[in-house]
Amino acid sequence: MSLPEPQELLTLPVGLYLGGVILGQAALIWYRNNQDKKLQSRRSEAGLDEQILVDHSVKLEMLRRKAILETIILLSTVVILPIILANIFTTEANALGTIFLALLLWVLISATDIAKAFLGGIAFRAFVGIRRPFQVGDRITVSGYSGKVEDIGPFFVRINTIDDDLVSIPTASLWTAPIVSANAGSKASLCVMTFHLDHSVKAKDRKAAEDQIWNAIQSSAYWDFEKPMQIYLDQERGAIVLTARAYVASTYNEALFKSDVYQAFLDFADENALPLAAAE
């Protein structure tokens, strides 16, 4: 989109747009002053100093209403109004777009935290819809929490953890947060399991342990037999490490899948007196 000349901005839709923004801000100022007068009146009736609240819950409720109203007015006048005007005055879309970008910059600099959070959350939801780094139903790890994505809202992304905790993470903060998706839209996901054998284990016992891991994976009801499976051998200080990589049919059953495999391996190690090593 090329930038229009200054005289091209002096159009009816641009005037309506700016007028709507100014009226919205004027209404917001009136509302703030009216609420301050009401609170001052309550203090006076209670005989309290103006620095003392009548009721902390009353003040919090007033702040909550003010924040919601500020967000509604800001989004209605700055974001929604130009879209409506652009559909009506199609030939003036270029001028409207220029003013919209200027006002959007102003919003990002001077808007309230709740408005910034909403705009950032809306932008992130649009990005998720286009690029799909994750979606509802995925099992992700973000900001130190792991679980199933229940909802991607404009303010919060809700994650249900394995402990059945519902964690709400601010959507706007995810622009800078590393996000790990276990299944990226797929039902199955890769499961990595490590087994540490003592360095004194002989070759035949090591091979038997590897076979046992293989059989335990294939015997689990949660294994996805349509995906490849590998077992790798590694030598660490004081331990021989077997790493199994297999897919669990439903990513939400990963804990049960691991439990099946580890239990079968530990039973095998106990029955055969196989020395194990601690994980580093």
Image (cartoon, helix red, strand yellow):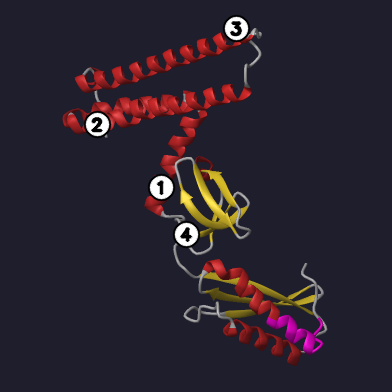
Look at discs 1 and 3 and give the one toward the viewer.
3
Numbered disc in front, either 1 or 2: 2
Inspect the magenta stretch and tell me whether residue 69 lies in it: no
Which residue is outermost to the bottom? Answer: 204
Q: Which residue is mark 3?
A: 44
State the separation of the CA atoms marked 4 and 1: 17 Å
- If the image is split into quadrants, where does the C terminus sit? bottom right
Residue 233, visible in the rendered structure: no
Where does label 1 land, which residue? 127
Left or right: where 218 falls relative to 78 = right
**Residue 137: numbered disc:** 4
User: Which residues lie in the magenta part?
Assistant: 264-275
Q: Residue at x 22, y 23 (%)?
A: 13
Check the image and report above or below for 154 versus 74.
below
Task: Say which mark, if any, is on residue 84.
Answer: 2
Q: Amino acid at mark 3?
A: Ser
Q: CA distance from mark 1 to mark 3?
A: 50 Å
